[in-house]
């Protein structure tokens, strides 16, 4: 089955919104073996949306639309799709009640008038209830064409897709596509690719290299009649890649390097504490993005000033004076200090220059990992300077800290 | 001038990549008065990319493509665009040298062989040098049609756009579009819209409501011959909106509520410290996303366990025993403790249940703000539970903490 994703919203074309919906839906559809042929974004404009629907149905059987179901007059996705299929809209009393009680649960009564529009539903088709907002979704079918309409906000769209759309789409797929992501850290995309160059030629399973944010990964994908069959096709290939790339691989299908680290610490019953300067809490934030991190992470200190480095983490004043805050010596004492303070198995610290700016020191970051056995310090040069380097440098520094921690845990085995 | 953005990459259609390029480019083009008519994403597929170019040029004069300039054989954007315009490719010695020295600066020598492909350039057209990666970009013109080709990684694409593409595009615009975003906190989109309903009808300037992540904003946009003229058109409207929405407005054109808070603290020469439990460092991370935050933020403590709440922040053991870690009493002592520890003007704390999960307490978060004058505690109910509520709850909790801090700063005037 071929499918196109159409996002509707002038705010997307104006750049007000980062469109994460298409990423989520693309991943989900790929896992069902549904080919996503194209992503299209059009404004809140009837004529252009009608044309997009027409174009999409020339190569696709199904179109999934997100956005334009809001309460304001410019929202017209539902109306335009109904026009395209020649369907009427009428007010649904049950849905109106639901929208009213959604507002009253939030302590808002009476309901804002404009939300009444969201209770209009097509006379034919399936209405998908929205448990996280006011706009219902829809599945419309006509002459073998399928239109799925979902609300724009991800917190409404994602549960609605999972609860209603995925089960509906599963009837149309007779093959499965299974993918595994082999994630590496510390080697670039080019080198990673060259080490497995001969493996990139296959067509089932396929191997494709990707790079993002200082990491490189290989995506191995197989098509088959069943999941077991697909896994069997991929196993020898994955084993071969594992043996070629060794400990550069931090995880297979791991969401992130921090997820790998959390799993490793959990398995060993160990804990980590972070002392962060240039990353300003990003390591703590990323590790606590993972539900259940409380088991292995109890304490983070963001020590943005020298007073806090000295007063809370116990970095010696003479170290700060002699070597400055951005030095291997300070990084070492920060890691040791936070490990002691938190009584943790590992203390990890970061101090450096995240930028922005073009001065020579921007991108220089020291990362220390302290364990019972030893404290190691890594000097990282991100190679990025300039006006917009700050986010990248902070992200890459935090990722490197997780990788250093990973290597320390492996080493302490 | 009308423009279409085409993103190229099978990895985007598979959902491996969140496409942030189109957001960046859309914002930039809007500011130049260039209409972005559509975003399209196609895979690394010559036929479909040729069709996308054809479609785009039926309504647009310019097409900006991102992605598909990598070193691997599946990257074919440059090749396909040259085919579309009937241009040849040849190796450019200077670019080859540049790519080689890029690798040697990173300590990688010899250059991976596959990168040689990136030194192929069209025989006609402009080559845009890449100071942050290996793939050059291109501007191609033919019969009044313009193709701009940029690399996919944002850290390469963004500087290349700013340095080369923006100055090039400015010659084509003879009107300016100026927008202001009026950002509110604490009132929903529906209520915000109803209070300004009569103002949403205008056509120059326009006012459009948007909602995201617990915030609602109004975007006011004017078209004119000059920036001054556009500003003059908008001024009375913005004044009217200000007077209707009052202190619900936290900023006009502020990037985020944390940016507003940083600016307020800087102006007053005050500082803030954070003690975070459920948000796990997110407040510290978000405030240090802003360059220059070190002036107003010195210390954050992520106190994920009771031991750290007691041992570092000085929350009384009896408070933890009697009221538990998630209570207004603990929140109050956390905020007071971190303020004392950091010797800051304000101490802000968060403790609650971010989820995931469906239990009743998920979404309950206490936020305390301590100043010299007083400590206030707010009980936040995010209204979000379930499997995927964690990110949302953490984000909204942090945003609410910034808003509480903002209100405290206003109050202390």
Image: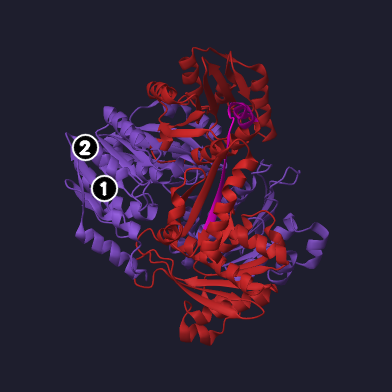
Chain colours: A red, B purple
Q: Secondary structure at mark 2?
A: helix
A381 to A205, vertically: above or below? below
* Mark before the other along the chain sequence, 1 or 2: 2
Q: Residue B85, labelled with which disc?
A: 2
Residue nearer the viewer, B184 or A16: A16
The percent coordinates of residue A105 (x first, y second) are 69, 33
Query: Is residue A378 rendered magenta in the image?
Result: no
Residue nearer the viewer, A406 or A387: A406
The percent coordinates of residue A272 (x first, y second) are 65, 68
Q: Which residues are magenta?
A: A164-183
The percent coordinates of residue B259 (x first, y second) are 47, 54
Residue displayed at 39% across by 69% down? A362
Q: On what subunit does the disc labeled 2 rest? A: B
Q: Quadrant of the C terminus of chain A?
A: bottom right
The percent coordinates of residue A222 (x first, y second) are 54, 43
Residue nearer the viewer, A41 or B53: B53
Q: Tell me if I can see residue B133 in this picture.
A: no
Q: Quadrant of residue A297?
A: bottom right
A146 to B121, vertically: above or below? above
């Amino acid at each position: 089955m071929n499918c196109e994703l159409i996002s509707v919203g002038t705010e997307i074309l104006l750049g007000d919104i980062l469109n994460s919906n298409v990423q989520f839906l693309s991943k989900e559809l790929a896992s069902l073996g549904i080919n996503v042929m194209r992503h299209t974004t059009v404004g809140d404009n009837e004529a252009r949306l009608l044309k997009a629907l027409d174009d999409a149905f020339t190569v696709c059987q199904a179109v999934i639309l997100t956005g334009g179901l809001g309460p304001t007059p410019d929202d017209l996705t539902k109306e335009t799709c109904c026009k395209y299929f020649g369907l009427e809209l009428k007010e649904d009393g049950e849905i109106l009640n639901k929208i009213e009680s959604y507002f009253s649960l939030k302590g808002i009564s009476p309901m804002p008038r404009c939300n009444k529009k969201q209770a209009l539903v097509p006379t034919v088709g399936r209405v998908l209830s929205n448990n996280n907002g006011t706009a219902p979704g829809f599945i419309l079918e006509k002459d073998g064409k399928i239109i799925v309409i979902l609300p724009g906000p991800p917190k409404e769209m994602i549960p609605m897709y999972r609860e209603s759309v995925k089960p509906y789409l599963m009837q149309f797929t007779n093959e499965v596509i299974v993918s595994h992501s082999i994630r590496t850290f510390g080697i670039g995309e080019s080198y990673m690719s060259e080490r497995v160059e001969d493996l990139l030629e296959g067509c089932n399973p396929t191997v494709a290299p990707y790079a993002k944010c200082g990491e490189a990964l290989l995506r191995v994908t197989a098509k088959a009649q069943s999941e077991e069959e697909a896994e069997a096709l991929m196993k020898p290939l994955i084993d071969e890649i594992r043996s070629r790339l060794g400990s550069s691989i931090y995880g297979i299908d791991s969401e992130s390097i921090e997820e790998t680290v959390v799993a490793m610490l959990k398995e060993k019953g160990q804990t980590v504490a972070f002392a962060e300067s240039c990353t300003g809490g990003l390591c703590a934030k990323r590790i606590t993005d993972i539900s259940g991190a409380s088991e292995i992470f109890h304490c983070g200190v963001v020590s943005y000033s020298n007073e806090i480095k000295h007063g809370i983490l116990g970095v010696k004043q003479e170290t700060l004076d002699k070597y400055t805050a951005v030095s291997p010596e300070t990084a070492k004492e920060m890691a040791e200090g936070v490990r002691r303070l938190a009584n943790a198995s590992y203390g990890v610290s970061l101090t450096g220059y995240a930028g922005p700016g073009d001065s020579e020191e921007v991108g220089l970051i020291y990362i220390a990992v302290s364990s019972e056995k030893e404290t190691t310090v890594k000097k990282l040069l991100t190679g990025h300077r300039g006006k917009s380097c700050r986010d990248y440098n902070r992200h890459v520094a935090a990722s490197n800290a997780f990788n250093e921690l990973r290597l320390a845990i492996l080493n302490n085995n």
